[in-house]
Image: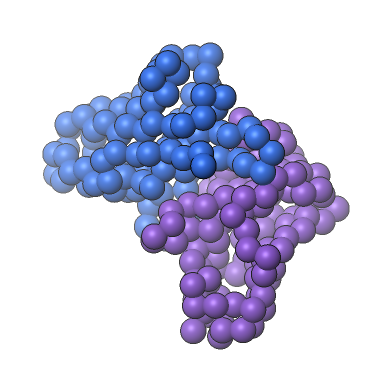
Amino acid sequence: DSGVTQTPKHLITATGQRVTLRCSPRSGDLSVYWYQQSLDQGLQFLIQYYNGEERAKGNILERFSAQQFPDLHSELNLSSLELGDSALYFCASSVGVQPIYEQYFGPGTRLTVT
Amino acid sequence: GENVEQHPSTLSVQEGDSAVIKCTYSDSASNYFPWYKQELGKGPQLIIDIRSNVGEKKDQRIAVTLNKTAKHFSLHITETQPEDSAVYFCAASFNQAGTALIFGKGTTLSVSS
């Protein structure tokens, strides 16, 4: 158990809908990273928040957004969903802002768009 | 763009044999190289990492080596066991704005008893 929690574990929704994925980092970690894992693209970095502020952006679509709240939990919002958005979504947390600190992954949310 | 290449994509060994997975990276400024193990239905688990000021690091049956000149690093698992069967990912840090860890495509390791 990494100490990172994610909810829900599974999510099934229809095209065009909007969903919110939630992540709680390990105690003491200030950074939250979001990743998308698909069979063809592997693990892709989406976005990072550190202590409530956006710090780095990767291959995140404009339809996706995230935020980190004062209690440090983070939410990833996916809107206007398409079939191709079906994937595993992981969050990871670390103590520091730079990607040189250990990142610990949560169990993931499996999103299925039908 | 920046990338990490990982080989092989699949690896089958007999229990007790050694397994080696190799990765190369493109950004010479990368300075942190973690390895993750992912079992079916679970999130990636950090198993070992190395930083650019170190050439080799060991933790029981696993070891990682880093060659900064050649820009490649490797994971070595000795005395493999069936529970080592999983997908292994290497990653490299990219410290430019807008990036974090770049992952390899993964290696599926199968250890047969």
Residue A14 falls left or right of residue A24: left
Q: Residue at x 21, y 29 (%)?
A: B18
Specify the quadrant of the image occupied by residue B5: top left
Q: How is the image coloured?
A: by chain
Instruction: Give chain B's shade.
Output: blue
Residue at 49% from the left image edge and 66% from the top image edge: A87
Between residue B110 and residue B21, name the one nearer to us. B21
Specify the farthest residue to the front.
Answer: B1
Q: Nearer the viewer, residue A55 or B3?
A: B3
Q: Please tell me which residue lies in front, A92 or B67.
A: B67
Q: Which chain is purple?
A: A
Q: Is residue A82 above or below residue B94?
A: below
- Residue A76 position, x and y percent, is 68, 63
Residue drawn at x 67%, y 58% as measured from the top left: A23
Q: Position of residue A45 (x, y in %)?
A: 57, 50
Total of numbered circles in the picture? 0
Location of residue B89 (image quadrant):
top left
User: In this rendering, does residue A15 appear at all?
Assistant: yes
- What x and y, as percent, mark residue B33? 49, 30
